[in-house]
Amino acid sequence: LIRTVLFRPPNYIPLFAQRSFSNQINHERTAAAIIIASEVLTGKVHDINTYTLTKLMFERGVSFKKVEIIHDEMDEIVEATRRLSKKYDYVFTSGGIGTTHDDITYEAIAKAFNRKLEHHQPTIDRMLEAFSKKGLELTDARKRMALLPSECNILLTPDSWVPLVVVNNVYILPGIPSLFEKMLTANKDQFKGAKFYRQIVLTKSLEAEYSDDLRSISEEYKGQVMIGSYPYSGVCKISVEGLEPNVVQTVSS
């Protein structure tokens, strides 16, 4: 028997719900990311792409498990790619596909899967068309961006020549946040998992006032829901997530 109300913090504010729907499957789909960006590790830029990716994965019903931020170093990229691609259904990389000396992601992922690098003519053709409209020359440096792992798959994005290169279960994306989001969103139907349900409860109470209740409910519903509490702008946000909408509703009531 499911109780109608399990926990309601003092100063409770009525909940609102966020739901994600995707095709039902029989097992959990998982994802991980490799952020290839020395500039993030040295504090020069913020990593925005992880937030974009995790948000979309939740919406698509894919359980995001891990993110690793590493330097633009060949051995690190190769090792991380091999290890994570064996463990998770989808692996995403961000960064390192431009024209400069430290843009080595294509080469590293080719090495991780024992592939060669080859100029991809359809990508070169799209580059020629895009650059000619801007009055730009297709230099050898720019052609490096079409030097891709052999036998890769290519996903296209409207109004962009940049390919979303796929090698096995690894999806290679640029580090530029706007382009990263555009390409990922355009190809979101590639990523499907189980239905996730999320409900948010807002309360003006302090976390210490309800932490014992949260702990006991988390133990009672272990394996069925994930519960988190996050102080935010004068209120605490309690998140309840799970695969069964009735359980999520009961716990958050």
Image (spheres, rainbow, N blue to C red):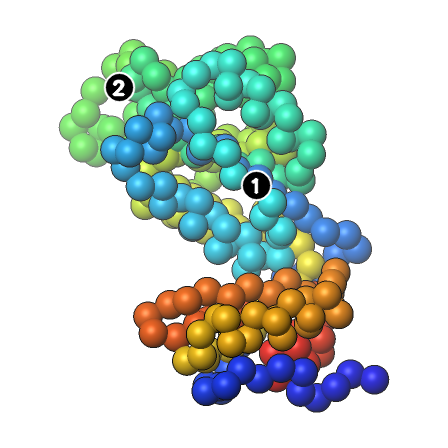
Which element type, helix, strand or loop, lies under badge 2? loop
Residue at the location (43% across, 16% down)? 73
Q: Nearer the viewer, residue 32 or 122?
A: 32
As drawn, 190 above or below 59: above
Residue at the location (65% across, 67% down)? 215
The amino acid marked with disc number 2 is Leu
Q: Position of residue 137 (x, y in %)?
A: 21, 20
Residue annotated with mark 2: 138
Residue 6 visible to an observer of this rendering: yes
Residue 163 visible to an observer of this rendering: no
Which element type, helix, strand or loop, lies under badge 1? strand
Residue annotated with mark 1: 66
As drawn, 51 above or below 180: below
**Quarter of the rendering occupied by the N terminus:** bottom right
Q: Nearer the viewer, mark 1 or mark 2?
A: 1
The amino acid marked with disc number 1 is Lys
185 relative position to 78: left or right: left
Q: Quadrant of residue 239?
A: bottom right
Residue at the location (45% across, 79% down)? 205
Furthest residue to the left? Answer: 135
Q: Real-space Cα distance between discs 1 and 2?
A: 37 Å
Q: Position of residue 252 (x, y in %)?
A: 61, 78
Residue at the location (58% across, 25% down)? 81
48 relative position to 4: left or right: left
* Residue 8 numbered mark, or none: none
As drawn, 157 above or below 78: below
Between disc 1 and disc 2, whose residue precedes? 1
Q: Position of residue 95 (x, y in %)?
A: 39, 30
Q: Position of residue 37 (x, y in %)?
A: 37, 29
Answer few, some or many: residues within 10 Å of disc 2's Cα (few below 14, many 20 plus, some between 14 and 19): some
**Quarter of the rendering occupied by the C terminus:** bottom right
